Image (cartoon, rainbow, N blue to C red):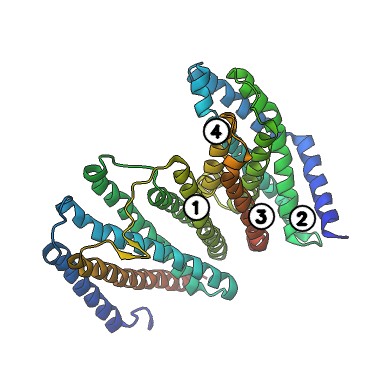
Amino acid sequence: MKQIQGKKGQVGALAWLTFAAITIALFLVFIYAPLEATMREVQKIFYFHVASAWLGMLAFFVVFVCSILYLIKRETKWDIYAYTSAEIGVIFTSIVLVTGPIWARPIWNTWWTWDIRLTTTLIMWFLYLAYGRIRASLGEEGKRAVYGAVFGIIAFIDVPIVFFSIRVWQDYQKTGLHPIVINSQGTGLAPDMKPAFFFSLFAFTILYAYLMQRSVKIETMKAEIKAIKDNVLG
Amino acid sequence: MNFARKVQILLWKEVKSELRAKEMISAMLVFSLLVVAVFGFALPSDRELVKQVFPGILWVTLTFAGILGLNRSFVSEKQNDCIYGLMLCPMDRAAIYCAKTIMNLLLMLIVELITIPLFFVMFNLTAPPNLSLFLLVLAVGTFGFMSVGTFLSALAANTRSSEVLLPILMIPMIVPILISAVQADKIILAGGGFLELKIFFNLLIVFAVVFTVVPLLLFDYLLEV
């Protein structure tokens, strides 16, 4: 029983930090940042869209790293990290896939186009949904962790290949609408928009850390309860 | 006994059991013939129009026929715990993966030999202007999706819902192959040469190499538990 409570103070601190960061981000996005000249209010979605996309990539990268670490070290914690990170990644990738078309409809006059970023995000989303399905259809813990890790690795290796194949395909057809906000020349943003943009990225990163901490705690508690049950029931 | 000999022995075992049961090949063949017929009904008989969609239809058919076969590839080893017998063989587990992949490729070859000419006949298409190039793209594409498919089939076979899981795992994984092979075939049917489709061909090669090496490295993990 002793450890199940965990370190309460830490969770609280991170929760408050996340709350503050998201509040400031909201302020910067909706009040501080100027309205975009042609896109008007619709452009506000961009701050959260990009932040979610960044978070999705980050989460899937964490899955990849934790999967490798699990296969090497065989410690349950890496499996828990990989799994919770994948869950969070799927949620935020879903947000990307929903906010993108909402923005695209008035701006591009279409909900969807087979652009590099859109398509890669969609395929990535499918891959990590599949990752979740593997875990859901395996009962034994050891097997679930190993199979999850194996798929977590090959899925992440697949993402750049998907990206390049779509890029080649797009180049061939000479299409592609998606704006590239950050490139080697810097950002294509007005100076007043930059704080809102970068702060949203920062706030979402903290949000990721907070969600990870919560879910890891829940998963750890589940594992402990299961251990206690097994102990009691024999 | 060297690695190639071990693979050969395992492959012979695969061929023998398939010759006796004819489980995979019959399902794959009947399915792909059905698909040819269904597209025959579903599409207009305008040859120019069919030419546009043909590469897509071809690769979708091959993918699903492949998945149908792959579904049985490792599940059949679960019966009577045959997989443990395989694992007890005094050889590198990678040999099992290689033998299974080669077997699946042989099955796909048979399916392709029968289905693709039928497609051309059914849709009243003339043979592609550059037949060797068409076959090359077909070979590399098939190899790529079978090498990753065999691996994923081993993964899915050990889960509770293997038959449903495999397509979910495999289709997003082979998107690069589908895109590159379909584009390459489009260029070939339009009369283009190797230089035009070189970039797509390179992608197929990259995919095939990556997804031969990575499964070989990770295959041991799938059989350990």
The one nearer the camera, A32 or B9, is A32
Instruction: List the residue tagged with mark 3.
Output: B212
**Residue shown at 54%/30% (left/top)?**
B57
Q: Looking at numbered disc 1 in the image, what kind of residue is underneath it?
A: Phe
User: In the image, residue A66 lies at what x, y percent?
Assistant: 49, 70
Callouts 3 and 1 on one subunit: no
Task: Report the side of B204 relative to B95 (left or right).
Answer: left
Q: Secondary structure at mark 1?
A: helix
Look at the numbered disc 3 and give the secondary structure of its residue. Answer: helix
> Could you give the CA–CA distance between mark 2 and mark 4, rounded to whole angstroms?
45 Å
Disc 4: host chain: B
Crowd band around label 1 with a 10 angstrom C-alpha radius: few (<14), some (14–19), many (20+) = some
Q: CA distance from mark 2 to mark 3?
A: 24 Å
The residue under the point 34% across, 65% down is: A185
Determine whether label 2 and label 1 are within 8 Å by CB: no
Residue A35: numbered disc: none
Q: Nearer the viewer, residue B113 or A66?
A: B113
User: Alpha-carbon distance for marks 4 and 1?
Assistant: 19 Å
Quick one: label 2, few (<14), some, or many (20+) residues within 10 Å? few
Dot 2 falls on a residue whose secondary structure is helix
Report the amino acid beneath label 4. Lys
Residue tagged 2: B85
In the orientation shown, which residue stands out farthest toward the right?
A: B1
Residue type highlighted by circle 2: Gly
How many neighbours does mark 3 have within 10 angstroms: few (below 14), some (14-19), or many (20 or more)?
many
Q: Label 4 near label 2: C-beta < 8 Å?
A: no
Q: Quadrant of the N terminus of chain A?
A: bottom left
Distance between mark 4 and mark 3 Cα atoms: 26 Å
- The three-letter amino acid code for the residue at tag 3 is Thr
> Which residue is denoted by mark 4 in the rendering?
B186
Tell me the subunit letter for badge 3: B
